[in-house]
Image (cartoon, rainbow, N blue to C red):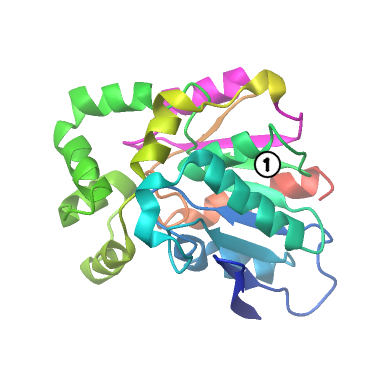
Amino acid sequence: MNAASRFGDLEVLCHSPGKGTPHPTPLLFVHGAYTGAWCWEEHFLPWFAAKGWTAYAVSLSGHGKSLHHDHLDSLSIDDYVRDLTQVIERLPSAPVLIGHSMGGMVVQKYLERAKAPAAVLMASVPPQGLMGSAFGLMFKKPHLLADLNRLMNAGEAQLESLREALFHQPIDEATLRRYYALSQAESHRAIWDMTLFNLPQPAQMHDVPMLILGASHDQLIPPDQVHMTATTYGLTAEIFDDIGHGMMLEHGWEGVAKRIAEWLESQSL
């Protein structure tokens, strides 16, 4: 069973398990910049529900069908953490937090304030921030960096830039255009927070089981940035071959989902 609901001002998607005994711990997925909860609806939410998990995805303020698009640019990473807290407080039990890209940064900042049963970071912004990734794009893919800046300013990015930013494997034109139509501007303030002004402080974070995943052909958060995150937390990153930044949307998404489910089972969750 799947449903969309509103937690205050926030859009929350939910897929409930069908038959059998569900896992006692729910999952809460947190999207990255320029997108919304819809990116998890494509594959991950129904897949995890079919495996017995209650799977939620939130659209952070100013994203998807959540409110506050009118002042998106004033929204900070702390605002997004408050969104996450609001949703968690209304769930029947504390969820595993699964964050992609900017969502991974939001999860890290949340863990400064509260515990969680576990966390999964997928192609996450590292605790050192976006500066390393931005310099990499500046030298290797300046056209892509320019288009992301254009999209951040509510301008029109090139369709091919979306393909290059998210996908390594082939994607059909109709699906790409559908994702393009769902993409949106991002908060300047949140981007600056992730670059310089509000980076995670690992020494202040609650120690929770953590899985750190990346993609071999990620143009935005390349493997070296993912390894840096893992090193910060004393862990080893797992890098998936032959996929790009959009790990939940690529054709290889199911391999990523299976690894997360396998790891959750190993944590007795």
Specify the quadrant of the image occupied by residue 35.
Answer: bottom left
- Residue 209 percent across, percent down from the top left: 75, 35
Residue 167 visible within the image: no
- Residue 146 percent across, percent down from the top left: 17, 38
Nearer to us in this view, 163 or 197: 197
**Which residue is at 74% across, 53% downward?**
95
Q: Which of the image's four quarters has the N terminus?
A: bottom right
- Residue 32 percent across, percent down from the top left: 45, 48
- Residue 256 percent across, percent down from the top left: 54, 49
Residue 17 visible within the image: yes
Identify the element where label 1 is drawn.
Answer: strand
**Which residue is at 24% across, 46% downward?**
164
Name the amino acid, label 1.
Ala
Q: Residues within 10 Å of mark 1 (few under 14, many from 20)?
A: many
Question: From what the image shows, is residue 103 above or below residue 25?
Answer: above
Left/right of residue 214 with respect to residue 166 in the rendered view: right
Specify the quadrant of the image occupied by residue 89.
Answer: bottom right
**How many numbered marks appear?**
1
Nearer to us in this view, 44 or 145: 145
In magenta segment, residue 209: yes
In magenta segment, residue 25: no
Question: From what the image shows, is residue 163 above or below residue 39?
Answer: above
Question: From what the image shows, is residue 83 above or below residue 196?
Answer: below
Give the residue number, with chain letter if any, for mark 1.
119
Please provide the residue range marked out in magenta: 205-234
**Which residue is at 75% across, 67% downward?**
52
